[in-house]
Amino acid sequence: MKKVIEALNRAKTFLICMHVDPDGDTIGSASALASVLAKLGKTSVIYSRDKVPDIYMFLKHMDKVKREIGREEKFDAVVTVDCGDIKRVAAGEEIRRHSGLLINIDHHPDNKKYGDINLVKKLSSTGEIIYGLIKQMKMKLDADISSAVYASIMTDTGCFKYDNTSAKVFSIARDLIRNGADPHDIAFRIYESKTRSEIKVLGLALQKMESTPDGRISWICLTMDDINKCGATSEEVSGIADHLRSLKDTDIAVFLRETEKGPVKINFRSKTRNVQKVARVFGGGGHRLASGAVVNLAIDEAREKVIDAVKSLWTQL
């Protein structure tokens, strides 16, 4: 942490990179870090190849996120937040051309340690790491920073119900609320603002649910035709895997969906089993109970291979 703080104090311009298909943790962490740098009198640009979901646009700086960075743009430092692998940043290794210093801030246990400086801690979220940085720097929390960190922690703990929720997490949440985060407003904006197309695609997805005879493994496959029929966007299908995991007898939930550019995205969720091991088989990764992968296969072939892998690895998970 000391090396990151020294780098933040020394550099003047920063490129903050979020991962593809940005979620609450990478978005909240980027928002909070940009606000911290602004307080230090620094200049920062936030980059995301993919659009920031509308539900997060209330967070500071999200209206200024850039989806392209010029090849010749230079910064004193590039900071990735919540990216276990540099490939999770759309530009991948090319992002290094923008600076001689790459700072990797992340909480994934399978992080590749690809940065010149790596601040990787197995905590509830990357937002919790950002919070620790702020405290170490003895900076005062304000409403913008508190809201961003709260959104980060809340989403990555599943509204404080996943097994990464701890007494420390609740203590941090308390501090953030005392410094301006509004838990009702943040939860309402993120979880109670669904679009009609999002509800439609969820309904269609649940109709297509399949399970093994014992119900322990359940899966849903969505084609681009399914998604387009509902008028849904990529961000509007991202929560389907979590609905599937909520089935009483299901321990491993798998959600596969086609993408416009061809590859099939796979989300793995579990109540008790290490689905990260399955994700690794397909070149992915993530967390023990929530992981993902992308494969260049037809969706039916992907489903067959993935479900076979889950079954064959079951006793090892």
Image (cartoon, rainbow, N blue to C red):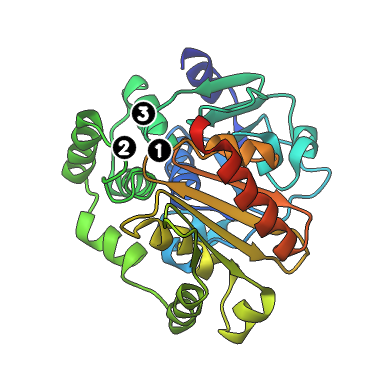
Closer to the chain start, of discs 2 and 1, is 1
- Picture disc at residue 17: none
Residue at the spot x=23%, y=40% of the render? 173
Q: CA distance from mark 3 to mark 2?
A: 25 Å
43 horizontally vs 28: left or right? right
- Is residue 52 among what the camera can see? yes
Q: Is residue 153 left or right of residue 273?
A: left
Give the amino acid at mark 3: Ile
**Element under label 3?**
helix
Residue at which label 1 appears: 127
- Reading the image, the residue beneath label 2 is 163
Q: Position of residue 78 (x, y in %)?
A: 65, 33
The residue lying at 47 percent from left, 68 percent from top is 54
Instruction: Judge by depth and name the residue closer to the eye, 186 or 238.
Output: 238
What amino acid is labelled 1 in the image?
A: Gly
Q: In the figure, 305 relative to 140: above or below?
A: below
Quadrant hosting residue 280: top right
Q: Position of residue 226 (x, y in %)?
A: 62, 79
Give the labeled residue for mark 3.
134
Which amino acid, by three-letter code, is at mark 2? Asp
Q: Nearer the viewer, mark 2 or mark 1?
A: 2
